[in-house]
Image: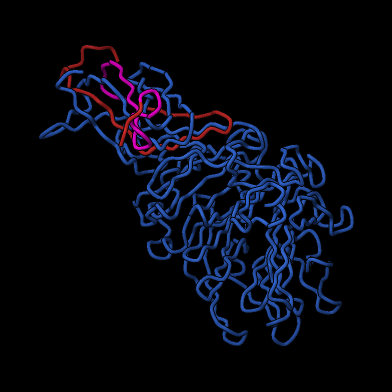
Amino acid sequence: MSSRDTAFSVHPALGGLDISSDPTVLDPGFLTVADNLEFLEGGQRKKRLGTQVYSSSTGNAVYTLISTASPVRAVADFWRYGASLTPTQNILAVSGASILRSTGSGVWSTVTATSSFGASGNLQTMITLAGDRAVISDETATPIAYDQTSLAGPTTGSAWPRFTGSRYHRDRLFMWGESTSPSRVTYTGAGNIFDSTGTDSGTFRVAEGDGDRLMACSKPFFNSLYFFKGPQYGSIWQLSGNTSTDFALVQVGYGAPAVSQRVMVTTPTDVFWMSQYGVHSLETTVKFGNVEEAFLSLPIQKLWRDNLIRRDRLPEAWAFWHPQRSLVGWGVYAAGETTQRWILIYNYALSDPKPGGRKYWSIWKFTDVGITAGDTWLISSGWDGIVGRSQPNHPAPLFGASNGTVYVGNWGTLTDAGTAYTATARTPVITRFPVQGGSVPETQEKGFTGLVTYFNPKGNYSADVTLWVDRRTLSTSISLVGGGATLT
Amino acid sequence: MAFILDTDVLGGSDFNFVELPYAERGRSIMVQWSQGGADQDMELFGYSIRYFPAEVESRDVT
């Protein structure tokens, strides 16, 4: 090695996917490809965890809820206390025209009569926990509540409207998405989610006739609900107040029209959603406005602008939150795809949500199935015993898939139900290199003599490395085995 | 602490970088790592590129 050699170190590498900037001027800490990666607390780029079929065995045979042609429309983790300090847990799913449940045994059973709930394939399906029940709605069917024993609805004379989505707030059920009144919210009396016509219940309209309809609502967030209108123009409305007599509605945001009720994620510190134009944070939007610079998705804005994701299928996008790994994600259709094989992943612990702040995005890509719904599941002790993890209540994403099967994410075996997937990290095109007292400019030649990769040894694995120097390519493999060689 | 030939490992878990030597000239470089093995992991901390300043005016076809 020449004594003139010097090293340009990007260690640690701090930055996520950025496909919107010119790759020749991008900070070398960012990535221009970040497939199937997650970012750990120090910014490390790690191959994402795998997925496993939720079933009564440890195998990965497809276990359809209804059929492979009936995508899973919704999934939910349903904990119920009733009149006991010991809760019971169900997993709920909607597939085809059926509502199903599992008690954690890996076995599904229908709780509705066959083909009796809603429209098969309608992904505008929502499950809300309210009043010790799970309220299931999709607007095409009469909404229904399930208490882990039986189905129930309001009695005659106080029937719910037929609504698309609901939230539980102040001991009341708030409902919206009515075909007869698209900007109306109906709320029940306090303490009774079935009382939608009594004296303590009511309705209000949110900017009716403004060219939009109510699309979505946050979960309770700092004592308020936030309603989102769309999908044309967009507006955000805060509902505050403790009782029905002092509810107050005020507009707090403009633009950023939500595309469906399923794209909302409410965490303890922020509300995230996907719009026609990108991904947004409520905190950032309220503070800095709905300017593109304030979009969380600015580094991946090319997905929307160049139609790299299917705009016509944005209403089928869905979101999930993974609290233990500090990420939120949105399932979308990649261009040309017929199902949602991509999940756009945002790490909110590492990212700076301010406009221009460093963001950590990656894209999880699935090859065998599309992911059509998701929720966070605290793994039940029953299934934990079946799979032998000894980690009950460990939070994991629960994914409903296009083949009618439910998968558990956060899986230590790094396959998608037995199928290998590829994690890829690619740097920007690095053109400017530092030297003492200045830099080697973009147009000057450099002699490249080596690449040093810093890694965390995870086992007897290797990585494929491809180097592009201008237009010439070198492909090889490097060992990711830790430790040194045995001295013989 | 004794070091036993043919048994002990020189390095250890702190030895967590690998160098790939090569020789190429050009104006720019881009690097990609990928790991596609079934149940095989990859966790990257960062990277360094060794280089030296070469001709101010390019002699190579890019």
Residue at 65 percent across and 47 percent down: it is A408
Q: Name the residue nearer the viewer: A110 or A164.
A: A110
Among the 4 quarters of the image, the one containing residue A60: top right
Residue at 33 percent across and 39 percent down: it is A29
Check if residue B13 falls in the magenta segment: yes
A277 shown above or below A211: above
Chain B tint as drawn = red
Quadrant location of the N terminus of chain A in the rendered image: top left
B30 shown above or below A141: above
Side of B58 relative to A213 (left or right): left
Quadrant location of the C terminus of chain A in the rendered image: top left
State the image coordinates of residue A344 (x, y, percent, origin top left).
53, 45
Residue at 76 percent across and 58 percent down: it is A103
- Which residue extends farthest right? A113
Side of B42 relative to A203 (left or right): left
Check if residue B16 falls in the magenta segment: yes
State the image coordinates of residue A11 (x, y, percent, origin top left).
30, 39
Over which residues does the magenta segment extend?
B5-29
- Which residue extends farthest left? A437
Chain A tint as drawn = blue
